[in-house]
Image: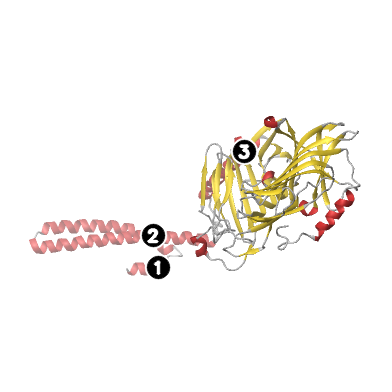
Amino acid sequence: MGIGSKMKLDLGLLFILFSFAFFSSLVSSDLILSKVDRRIDLTSHIVRITSTLKVENDGNDEVSELVITFPDQQAKHLALVSAYHNEGRGKTKSRGASLPVKPFQSVEMPQSLTSYSVSLPKKLSKGEGLNLEVLAVFAQILKPFPEQVSQGDFQLVVFQDSAYILSPYAVKVQTLSVKLPDARIESYTKLENSKAQGSEIKYGPYENKSPFSYSPIVVHYEYNKPYTVAQKLVREIEISHWGNVQITEHYNLVHGGAILKGEFSRLDYQMSPHTKGASAFGWLVAKLPPRTHSIYYRDEIGNISTSNLWGNSIKTELAIEPRFPLFGGWKTFFTFGYGLPLMEYLFEAEGKRFVNISFGSPIDELVVNELIVKVVLPEGSTDLSVSVPFEVEQWQETKVSHLDISGRPVIVLRKVNAVPEHNQNFQVYYKFNCLSLLREPLMLILGFFSLFVACIAYSHADFSISKSSTSYLAKLQWDEVQTTIQQLENIINRCLTIHDKLEASLRELSRTGNVQACKTARKTSDSLLKEFSKELKPLLISLQSSPQGAQIFPKVCNF
């Protein structure tokens, strides 16, 4: 093998090989694989293996299922396995409906294998056959080698598999092609009938292989695309019957590739990001539904403005740039959310409403170790049920928000090892009384009405302790004294004004000698002073008789 000096196969693999040789004589089946074409796609850090199988029944009994197997070292990275019935031939060939796939256990199978059974679309009698397509998706199966790189190094990864399909059935003819990101291949296992052409490695054809035939291959190649892994993603989908679906996604993201060793130079990265940051990634692309609106992108610090958005009537794409480039082992936390029109995702059937919306993350080629999807339904929703096209954990919660009384029911779904193939539509069914829509408007109306009534009552209410209390009476008496003093002050000011007028008439008399004018002014002043005296008398009596004014009365009289 080309990298035998760099990397050794697991000792467990040798045990697997001996187990396969032993069990191949024990496992018998009426089925044979007359032709197998396998395609391994290594252009992403999510590995996809597509196997086209031509299955034939070579026995006397009818067969209704096909068993597919994976080594345990691969199966622990298996995120999804699906099977389809291919219909037609040549140019008319098309993928049919998905076939049921479920775990399979048998005492005849080696302990080091994980098996699944595929239910065939029809029972195969002797001599009958059909074409199947099996898709297996693996997450985090690529191993960085070396495991640590400096800032200026390119990232190399290793992939291990078998040149032969690992199957409990005999295989007449099989081929294998391995598609790489580009032609920069460090090394690969060279076998009979193997060759590399550009970014593709081909093995085969190989003929007449017995059950559980296994020939290990290792491919060591350069991979500098984003190795994005979300350790945890919480996706909240809030349904509002007022016309909006609000989606909020909280990401705990890590670069799953080779760990950065040494120091990081921001200057070197900015000057030459393709050579001084080849193993890092600085952008993520989220493919959102059309007519997405109210998009935001932030982290714990605040809003992040380094993002670009473009779209049309078919799609909307958001390019997200973290605050810093991510190298191997580096993490970042961020949140982004957006709104969708409700009419495109809420439907009604058989007396129930149901939400039909996508399950996974919209970010390209993202592996999610733990994906939690929360569907928040309107308050008052009842008879909840969920339909998901794959297995998930499920439970219910309650979320209390503004203007809620009992809280909103929440459907919680949990999926481990989620990949883009899990981004399928799922449905949440529930019943909802339309009258419940009036609950929040009525609460607002009642709240404002109560506020206005309270304000009116407050403005007209008397909050004194008691009108017969000593303090309250003393306050009234003091108010009366202040009013009396103010009236006395006004009368005195008017007297002073008359006094000023008399002095002015005397000065005019000395200047002109007009005695008659002076007498007239004197007569007018005397009459006004008599009236002021009459007004003063009841005020002084009131002031003298008041307990609060007794101390002030002598000072007023002296004045």
Type of the residue with mark 1:
Ile
Residue 311, horizontal then vertical, whole percent? 52, 41
Residue 222, horizontal then vertical, whole percent? 63, 56
Placement of 378 over or under 475, stated as above or below: above
Closest to the observer, 196 or 441: 196
Label 3 to label 2, Cα distance in Å? 68 Å
State the quadrant of the N terminus. bottom right
Label located before the other in sequence (1 or 3): 3
Farthest residue to the front: give it: 192
Label 1 to label 2, Cα distance in Å? 11 Å
Closest to the observer, 382 or 257: 257
Which colour assignment does the render follow? secondary structure
Q: Are marks 1 and 3 in contact (CB under 8 Å)?
A: no
Q: In the rendered image, which residue does mark 1 sit on?
A: 552
Residue 454, horizontal then vertical, whole percent? 55, 47
Is there any visible trace of residue 256 in the rendered image? no
Q: Nearer the viewer, mark 3 or mark 2?
A: 3
Placement of 429 over or under 417, stated as above or below: above
Q: In the rendered image, which residue does mark 3 sit on?
A: 241
Q: In the rendered image, which residue does mark 2 sit on?
A: 484
State the quadrant of the C terminus. bottom left
Closest to the observer, 174 or 362: 174
